[in-house]
Image: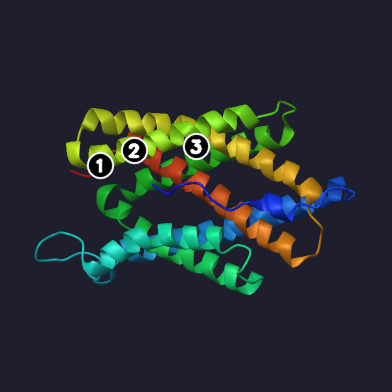
Amino acid sequence: MDNQNNWNFNSLNQPGLAQTASTTRTFLSNVFSWMGIALGISAVTAYVFGNNASYMSYLINMESGGMSALGYIVMFAPLGMVLLMGMGFNKLSMSALTGVFLLYSVVMGVSLSFIFLAYTQSAIFQVFFISAAMFGGMALVGYTTKTDLTKLGSLLMMALFGIIIAAIVNMFMKSSGLSYAISFISVIVFTGLTAYDVQKLKNMSATVEPGTEATAKLSIMGALTLYLDFINLFLALLRLFGGRRD
């Protein structure tokens, strides 16, 4: 499970800039556009790889049935790319950051192709649309609510770290009950984080300067945050309701 982003946008905030509703809409539009592009790339890549045995043979050792060296690289490379974008935010140019983000969406798509081996296509598509509806609803809540979600976000982030620790422990325990509990809590956490992150991005738009490279880079990092919220919500729902192949 991917962690939330580690980038710090506060260093680029510029208090005192006049903020208009148009600027907020433009910034959030860019964020959601980049998120949509990344999700589209990941979805197409996952579908192509997941439905092509010759492509999957590069990821799975056909003799042992386990993952190949490339398969392990594909599984762990996305985390490395998230860390690269987060820690290298100030140093990477907009072009470089965009390139890493788009490459990340491709690699994530390859990584997600494994779900086509575990679940039926109908289950994957159904859960995807359910996830999209839930994500859209919570994004709207985050955008429109007048309630400050900062405290909620802090609690959800602590719960997220707990989920990560529990998931690592369960890699050794292999408990189906714990796995179900992790998935159930993950749905709650990432549903809430969606609203929190959208509100955070909306508030952040009040301090950005339109048309600058810094703002463009922030839109990429915002897209990454929401992309992670959606993917983790989707995977948690898929584990709960997808119904594995026999």
Residues at circles 2 and 3 in contact by the CB criterion of under 8 Å: no
- Indicate which disc, 1 or 2, sits on the residue closer to the N terminus: 2
Please say if 5 is above or below 108.
above
Towards the viewer: 132 or 82: 82
Q: Quadrant of the C terminus?
A: top left
Please say if 242 is above or below 117.
above
Q: Nearer the viewer, mark 1 or mark 3?
A: 3
- Whether residue 51 can be seen here: no
Residue with the mark numbered 1: 244
86 to the left or right of 94: left
What is the number of the mark on residue 190?
3
How far across and how far down the image is residue 153, in percent?
58, 33
What is the number of the mark on residue 165?
2
Q: Residue at x 10, y 62 (%)?
A: 64
Residues at circles 1 and 3 in contact by the CB criterion of under 8 Å: no
Q: CA distance from mark 1 to mark 2?
A: 24 Å
Q: Secondary structure at mark 2?
A: helix
Q: Residues within 10 Å of mark 1 (few under 14, many from 20)?
A: some
